[in-house]
Image (spheres, helix red, strand yellow):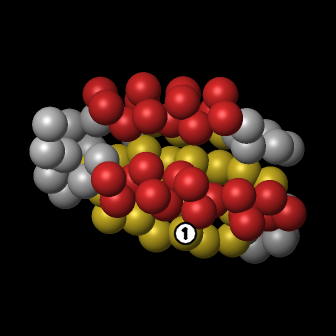
Amino acid sequence: MDVLDFGEIVTKEDITRAGTLLARVKPGEEVKIVMEAADAHQADELFFLLRREGFDYQPKGSGDGRRYCITARRTKRPPR
């Protein structure tokens, strides 16, 4: 499973990097995206990207409340 750790702030470059990684993921494979819990409000753009690229996803906060994780599985190839 590939892991994208965005650290403290999710930037436009991070979204671009996520798009590049997601394009390489095959159906049935998973990706984990991690960010600071305080920045979880920035996940909307990632959710849009995941839906567009054919992923189902499950967001979840960490037990200590510091991290926000999104586990995504590609269910289909996006239309080109």
Look at 51% across and 35% down and name the residue there: 18
Q: Where residue 36 appears, x then y in whole percent?
A: 80, 54
Check disc 1: other Cα within 10 Å, few if <14, some if 14-19, many if 20+.
some
Q: Residue at x 65, y 49 (%)?
A: 34
SS type, badge 1: strand
* Residue 42, visible in the rendered structure: yes
Residue sitting at x 49%, y 60%: 47
Decide if residue 56 is on the left or right side of residue 70.
left
Number of numbered markers:
1
Left or right: 48, with 78 as reference point? right
Query: At 32% across and 64% down in the image, what residue appears?
Result: 56
Question: Which residue corresponds to mark 1?
Answer: 59
Image quadrant containing the N terminus: top left
Q: Is residue 33 above or below residue 41?
A: above
Kind of residue indicated by mark 1? Pro
Is residue 72 in view?
A: no
Q: Is residue 74 left or right of residue 16?
A: left
Q: Is residue 74 left or right of residue 77?
A: right
Viewer-nearest residue: 79 or 20: 79
Q: How far from the left and from the top, in percent, is residue 67?
A: 76, 59
**Residue 15 coordinates in the image, percent (x, y):** 58, 38
Measured along the vertical axis of the image, is residue 40 above or below residue 2?
below
Residue 50 location (% of width, % of height)? 40, 53
Depth order, front residue of 66/75: 75
Q: In what quadrant of the picture does the C terminus appear?
A: top left
Find residue 25 and report its image quarter: top left
